[in-house]
Image (tube, rainbow, N blue to C red):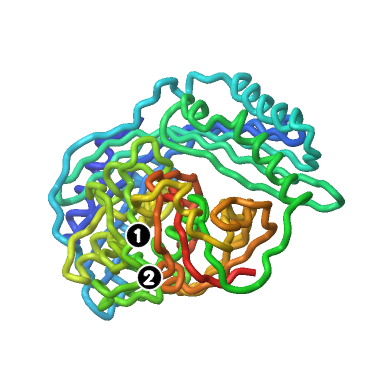
Amino acid sequence: MIDEDLAEYMLDAASKHTPVLAEVRLESTSCMQLALKAGQVDTIASSQDAGMNVKIFFASGVGFSSSNVVSKAEGLRLVRQAVSQAKSARRKSPCTLSAEKAVRTSWEVRQKKSLADVTTEEKLDYLRSLDSAALKTGVKVQGRYYDLKDWETTRFFGNSEGSRIKSFIPRMKVESYNLVSAKGETEQSMREWAGSGGWELKDEWNLLEVLPDEMRMLKKQIEHGKRVKPGKCDLVCGSEVTGIAAHESCGHPMEGDRIQGREMSQAGRSFISEDMIGQRLGSKYATVIDDPGIPGSYGYYAYDEEGVKARPRYLYKEGLINEFLHNRETGSKMGLVSNGSSRAESYLREPIVRMGNTFVAPGDFEEDELFGTVKDGVLMNSFTEWNIDDKRYNQKYVSREAYFIKDGELAGPARKCTIEITTPAFWSAIDAVTKKVRFDAAECGKGDPGQGMSVFTGGPMLRLRGVSLR
């Protein structure tokens, strides 16, 4: 149970120091994790965690303090520590925050079947069924590891402006690690499926069919895959490749703290600058949205960690740089309000600017239409490796599943197809986008200390003209 009276006590204590703003968060999480390795139980673990934090804003700077001890005495200590940090800070310019309306509300993600009601044995049986399905393919899978994690988190947020927000969100994810061998060679697959909701999520993922298909595909890549002749050709990106590009080369460089030069270890850097709003970065087909409000998504939230209501953010709009991701501080520095982009991994970490669910907007093409005008090209359906520099400008993707395209038709598998390209070149090469959007779950890393954040990446298929592959 969350002690809301404790939050009020801490806010009252903070208000005596007359800060610009005081925020208090209380959190409680129950978690279960199970893993199967080569058909044998590898992990069974459950945990309960609870804690709180306080963040204090003065004109001179910001103080943040957190603890897994929940008591009035500890709350008072956290307030004093955060106040001391904020007062001793020496910002070059005053710390300001965007004006936001106080909110009093509660929100939750409902479960059709509560994660807490599913037994350990039922969860293990599910993992065993995945392992069995992989074995029945007849494919030689030397490494098989399946991990299931679910957790339910209750939070309470309050600030000195009068916001009070209660929330409850259950999440569940399955990770699979498989190493397929054939003809003396290997290919690996690391996949993740996750969302917000209850035990019913597993039915949406249909992994009893998806995983065997993955094993057979990897075997086919080894046995029949051929290397791409280095040079320029047309490239069709599957939704998984579309999604990683949207996340890495649009979402991250559009984070307000990166753009404003917050210390590199916290947020990295960006090739984007504040004065680039409205500048063309890609073709008219390049619209990238970050939307935390997608029901059932892994990155779902209704209000961010500063009590600001979440909404879709159009980062690139028809190829133009349109909007940055902001919290109250970064928004204020640009004369804007927050767009609800403040998130934290847990009560132990300071909320920073983060993505929710980042994807390319759908277009007007059917999927088979993308291939029709491609005389010589490649479909990169999924990736096994990606790299991008700290400015989010130069990037590289290596395929896990790829196929040649010859005269508008899919041909044999293309193995380890690689594209190295700049961010503007990638988005400018798009000349067609399909109607159907698909999503993949991912863990986004950022911050120091590092924070992993639940997100969706995704989009439709994209067609890029005349890009260099090898």
Q: Tell me if I can see residue 81 in this picture.
A: no
- Distance CA(mark 2)–CA(mark 1): 9 Å
> Which residue in the protein does label 1 denote?
353
**Helix, strand or loop status at disc 2:** helix
Mark 2 Cα within 10 Å, few/some/many (few <14, many 20+)?
many
Q: Position of residue 159 (x, y in %)?
A: 21, 49
Residue most toward the right? 184
Q: Quick one: 428 or 39, which is closer to the camera?
A: 428
Amino acid of disc 1: Val
Q: Are marks 2 and 1 in contact (CB under 8 Å)?
A: yes
Q: Position of residue 408 (x, y in %)?
A: 54, 55
Could you tell me which residue is drawn at 46 percent across and 47 percent down? 367
- Name the N-terminal-most of marks 2 and 1: 2
> Which residue in the protein does label 2 denote?
258
- Relative to 277, residue 132 above or below: above
- Relative to 202, residue 104 above or below: below
- Relative to 78, residue 418 above or below: below
**Helix, strand or loop status at disc 1:** strand
Q: Quick one: 156 or 3, which is closer to the camera?
A: 156
Position of 234 with respect to 323 (left or right) is right
